[in-house]
Amino acid sequence: MEQTAGRGRPRSESARIAVLHAVDDLLVEVGYANLSLKGIADRAGVGRQTLYRWWSTKAEILLEASSHDARHELAVPETGGAEEQLVAYLDALGVFLTRSHAGTAYRALLGEAQHDPAVAELLARNDLLGDSARLVIARVTEDDLPEPALGRAVATLVGPAFFWALTGHDPSVLDRAAAARACLEEARAGR
Amino acid sequence: MEQTAGRGRPRSESARIAVLHAVDDLLVEVGYANLSLKGIADRAGVGRQTLYRWWSTKAEILLEASSHDARHELAVPETGGAEEQLVAYLDALGVFLTRSHAGTAYRALLGEAQHDPAVAELLARNDLLGDSARLVIARVTEDDLPEPALGRAVATLVGPAFFWALTGHDPSVLDRAAAARACLEEARAGR
Amino acid sequence: MEQTAGRGRPRSESARIAVLHAVDDLLVEVGYANLSLKGIADRAGVGRQTLYRWWSTKAEILLEASSHDARHELAVPETGGAEEQLVAYLDALGVFLTRSHAGTAYRALLGEAQHDPAVAELLARNDLLGDSARLVIARVTEDDLPEPALGRAVATLVGPAFFWALTGHDPSVLDRAAAARACLEEARAGR
Amino acid sequence: MEQTAGRGRPRSESARIAVLHAVDDLLVEVGYANLSLKGIADRAGVGRQTLYRWWSTKAEILLEASSHDARHELAVPETGGAEEQLVAYLDALGVFLTRSHAGTAYRALLGEAQHDPAVAELLARNDLLGDSARLVIARVTEDDLPEPALGRAVATLVGPAFFWALTGHDPSVLDRAAAARACLEEARAGR
DNA sequence: GTCTAAGCGAGACGGTACGTCTGGTCTTTAC
DNA sequence: GTAAAGACCAGACGTACCGTCTCGCTTAGAC
């Protein structure tokens, strides 16, 4: 799709995979702060120029490396009532934010977004968390909620767990059912 | 209390002030990502060693530089009913997170905390946001809520605005009254 | 011989030249004591890493920068008798030690060798002065003098001028003919 | 003579001794290159200001610390003939330059003099080596040799050993008797 | 018996070089 | 024309030492 014909040597898929794996591994091993493009290239056995050719920043690499897993981990089965599904979503969100590799990557990206407007915009265009919440809310309310109200419902649902996790606590102590109910209330009001 | 006897030359208060001002200014001018200890030292007209002598990281300097203002901006007058005070607090929080210098510093620190466990711990020991929320909640509930419940109330109150602001949106579109009510509900349940 | 194939970017000859010129200039301008690798890099318009990649110490750079000139300045035409050639050599040595740029570099290196064993060894492997003296002595004696005796002849020939110059005096007041004769005497005895 | 009356607290002799001992020890332990005034002060248990109050440079301290020993080690008994005394002097000189602490200090100072004109002048005013040689030559020639000639005799006597030692060799392989004879010859010619 | 002066150890001050690291670019050969 | 390799310039990192500057304390002579 990006690469139409290609006159010369085609892009190496193996290099791409190696980079994504390397960044995944290194994030766990050394943390985002100590993650360098040089380190990624060395670990992946890839030239430095190759990184710069296909990605602009380490945020972009990290996003590509983690977004697939993130999306998967934040999806929730369509079984049970509305509140039940929202609670299930909050369960998944809690695990994602505190115990998942993809979640660690997401938190790192969101942290970087507070430092760097470019990363903030990148995340705005790939709103892993917000999109997943929107999806489940839209499904359980069976209602085409307009955006301002949908956003309010999302914030009400995920806000508490998000705050609790990002300030270093374990969101499993929170009252998921209450958050789900408040979200539904918000959705009803926004209709 | 910190300086008991002091045999050698005492710490220079003017250097300390110069550093805090420099970090404040630079955060606005170049952003956290481009904030370097060298830059702070140069701007403050201070030796590099002096920075390292009194602070370990740029996060620590930034925290000291902004915590006073932050605490002040997140304090709320004791006038009006419970819900009214909580809404006033959420007003202040929205301004803090999106338009205040101290809030910019706080967001940068919280971002760094996602990259660096040391910063995370530093913020945990100086929980500007959580403490201010605890204060106002404890006041309006006139109740000695035990910690797990108090934490839940805090997360319910500030979570939505926190999430909305950190993902790049303006929390003034949120329903502050609903959040205040949900918080009070949570507090009542935790009694 | 040193560079067989090389997959990556080859060493920049222009950077090498710029460094050698910079160190030459700076030695004259600021003196060895105030010669810093940072200063050399800045003056040469070269990255600091490039210096460390190709040389270990400023002594090594200085040696490379000056050895060519030094060798040239200490060479003596093959005209005249034995004593005549030795006197001509001592003339050149006197100029070298007191008035030549390369000689200033040599004296600085020899000074550093008294402080730092690594530099001492470096100079031992590149014995600019001793080698030039050995060359001329071997030539005029037309004799394959064995090393211990050759060394004695060298010391007898250059010792007085060397001492006189390094203790801050002008060796042109010394009796070059006497030193040449003593050297020949020493060589004859060592046969 | 230096200290006439003094209204305030008199100079601490114990501090002076401690500094001289410290510099002596550290020269052996870490070498001149790694000798710092801070290190000397710490080792001596002395304030940094005290060093700067009484000495200007580390060269000055080192000279004071070693000159007494140096003078003693380069003195030679007045027994035996002229050549015999000169040879004895060269023996002492060889030991001094290669195996004595004071000699190590002298070589370090002479090295520094090649980098720093101030040290060169300091050594010129305290010509440990030249003075000792002048003394023994004047004694054995029983002649008030005028300076230019005396200097030539000194250079002839000590030059070879000096060169040999400072270029990293052991001067005990040199022909001391030949040097002594050449020196006497030089002295006779300069009369 | 103060008072004043100077030296003392301690240690912070503004600077600056150190050697290392990373960023982003450029220039080779190999495929 | 992409890939890996690796050198290029630039500049921040945290450390060490420089020479200077306060501190509180000590030790003397002067009053």
Image (spheres, coloured by chain):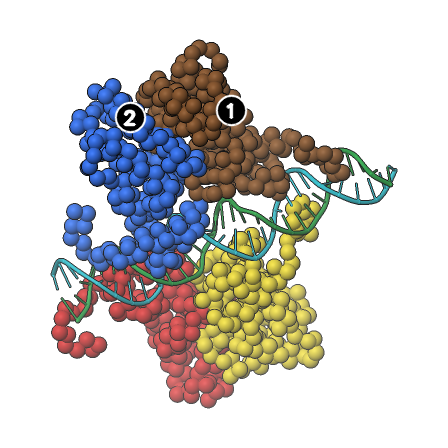
Chain colours: A red, B yellow, C blue, D brown, E cyan, F green
Closer to the camera, B153 or C105?
Answer: C105
Question: Residue D112 occupies which quadrant of the picture?
Answer: top left
Closer to the camera, D35 or A30?
Answer: D35
Q: Residue furthest front?
A: D191
Q: Residue at x 16, y 50 (%)?
A: C4
- For disc 1, the marked residue is D71
Closer to the camera, A51 or D121?
Answer: D121
- For disc 2, the marked residue is C181
Q: Is residue D8 left or right of residue C127?
A: right
Q: Which amino acid type is marked by label 1? A: Arg
Q: Residue at x 49, y 13 (%)?
A: D78
- One can see residue C32 in this view: yes
Q: Which amino acid type is marked by label 2? A: Arg
Q: Is residue B69 above or below residue C126?
A: below
Chain letter of the residue carrying label 2: C
What x and y, as percent, mark residue A14? 20, 63
What x and y, as percent, mark residue B148? 56, 63
